[in-house]
Image (cartoon, rainbow, N blue to C red):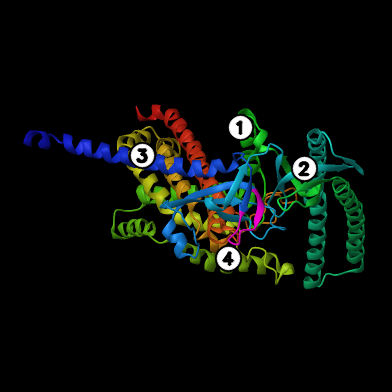
Amino acid sequence: MGKWFKSGAPWIWMTGGAVSLSLVAVLGLLLLIGWRGLTYFWPHPIYEWQVKDASGAKSTLIGEINDRELVPVEQLRAAGLALTGEERKDLTRYLVKTGNREFVGLDFRWVLETDILSRSQPKELAVLERSTNGNFYGYLSAAREDGKVITTDLHPVIERMLARSNRLSEEADALQKGDIGSINYQLEKLRLKERKAELDGEVTDSLKADLAKQRETLNADYQVLEKQLFDLRRQADRDAIKVRDMRGVEVEMPMSKVLDITWPNEMSLLGKVGHWFHQIGKFVSGEPREANTEGGVFPAIFGTVFMVILMAIIVTPLGVVAAVYLHEYAGKNGLTKLIRIAVINLAGVPSIVYGVFGLGFFVYTLGGSLDQLFYPEALPSPTFGSPGVIWSALTLAILTLPVVIVSTEEGLARIPSTVRQGSLALGATQAETLWRIVLPMASPAIMTGLILAIARAAGEVAPLMLVGVVKLAPTLPVDGNFPYLHVERKFMHLGFHIYDVGFQSPNVEAARPLVYATSFLLVTVIVGLNLTAIGIRNHLREKFRSLEH
């Protein structure tokens, strides 16, 4: 036994076991998040219950089961329920998503199994996904298409009406965000141009006439586009459907408010799988609705990826230059050691401290100075003097700078000195040796530092809350208006989206599945960015492998 311990085999097994347990824990966590998040998009069956309340009054309840739990009978009796003659120790309680929130007080409600008189699963029950007020559950009784009321064979009619309504709504949104948004942007530019001329004392009659002419042209175009927009919305409001809800009341609903209609109880397994993929696609590509508790997360995905790419573009040259200076040029003295210690200690500074620094230096000092120098006409409304994606990228670049510096230095240290000496002996200068030999050989280590920087930056939230991220951004940092890349704008982020939905949502039960889904998506985005960087690193390693021999 003593020889076995001295051989080191037990420590190898312990290390391997610890690594295995860590991998199992990580995979288990990912599976839990993925399962709780992705099952949200599965078309769950819709039930119709006949229930009674504490007074014995009967009512109808329509909805889907969101959760269930066992509750001790003693706890229920302590809460005031009689439960006379109940001998079981535990009773099942169902959390039912009822929807129809403009007519029903609660979007979710708990139903005790003893209050259920009957439960059925009618195939005719439909789920209406709406742009506002969440889902609506009920029986489709009639459709009004172009003034004609239809009560039979509703499925093909409704599918045709829904496709038409969605197409018109998409055209209206594209017109509002595209051409109309461009005109508003140009009108604001004209206002700022006139204001700048006033500040510079360069206002002339010809300038005023030219600006007035441009405004007149833009306003005329705006009137035409506005008429088209109203016409599209009027066409979208042409059709409507009637739905009988759990109260037994027929509710007429315009098709312009309906995004999708499904009948989950009559779906086949293949149909459910197709609908599941369709819902995931809408979640990834859509925009958030209802205080971020419904809809998609595309702006958050775009903001996260855009900010991380911008951060990588900033931090890579800064980190590489700093590492090259420290390893190749700086003397081996106390000052260099002090700088290295400072760089290492920077990696341990809490991220919120970087956020405070970014807010004070980048936003207020640097951004405010830029506004004073280049955008005085926009003041007091700040341009760069307010949180934005550029300041977020710079703040995270400083936060991850130590990682890149240390990783690059490690890569430079692994390159044999004989390689440098051979290059110099052949007549190359130190700069040529560095550019053509040393940096290519160290590029895998540089990419490793970048991978670690991306992994940390993509998941940071605390500093971003101070320097750029918002709950809902009206526009993306990239659009069709010059200069096309608007790095001064605020943006959405998946990490902050998770925080907002999980802790700031007015509807906790509706938000909980989206927390898991967005968390799984954030992990997927980070893994995707890392895999891309790893692929580039492996390519560089193979490309410059010959320099090692």
- Marks counted in the figure total 4
Mark-to-mark CA distance, 2 and 3: 50 Å
Secondary element under disc 2, as helix, strand or loop, is strand
**Residue 417 point in image, percent of width and height:** 31, 38
**Residue 105 point in image, percent of width and height:** 66, 61
Quadrant where the image shows the C terminus: top left
Res. 477 visible in picture: no
Mark-to-mark CA distance, 3 and 4: 41 Å
Secondary element under disc 4, as helix, strand or loop, is helix
The mark lying in front, picked from 1 and 3, is: 1
Mark-to-mark CA distance, 2 and 1: 24 Å
Label 2, residues with CA under 10 Å away: few <14, some 14-19, many ≥20: many
The residue indicated by pointer 2 is 140
Question: Which numbered disc flags the more N-terminal residue, 2 or 3?
Answer: 3
Give the residue at x 59% y 48%: 117
Secondary element under disc 3, as helix, strand or loop, is helix
The mark lying in front, picked from 2 and 3, is: 2
Compare residues 12 and 92 and report the one nearer the observer: 92
Residue type indicated by callout 4: Val
Residue type indicated by callout 3: Leu
Magenta region, residue range: 52-62
Choose top left, top right, bottom left or bottom right for residue 212.
bottom right
Question: Which numbered disc flags the more N-terminal residue, 2 or 1?
Answer: 2
The residue indicated by pointer 4 is 363
Question: Which numbered disc flags the more N-terminal residue, 3 or 4?
Answer: 3
Residue type indicated by callout 1: Val
Give the residue at x 43% y 42%: 446
Q: Which mark is residue 273?
A: 1
Compare residues 351 and 31 and report the one nearer the observer: 31
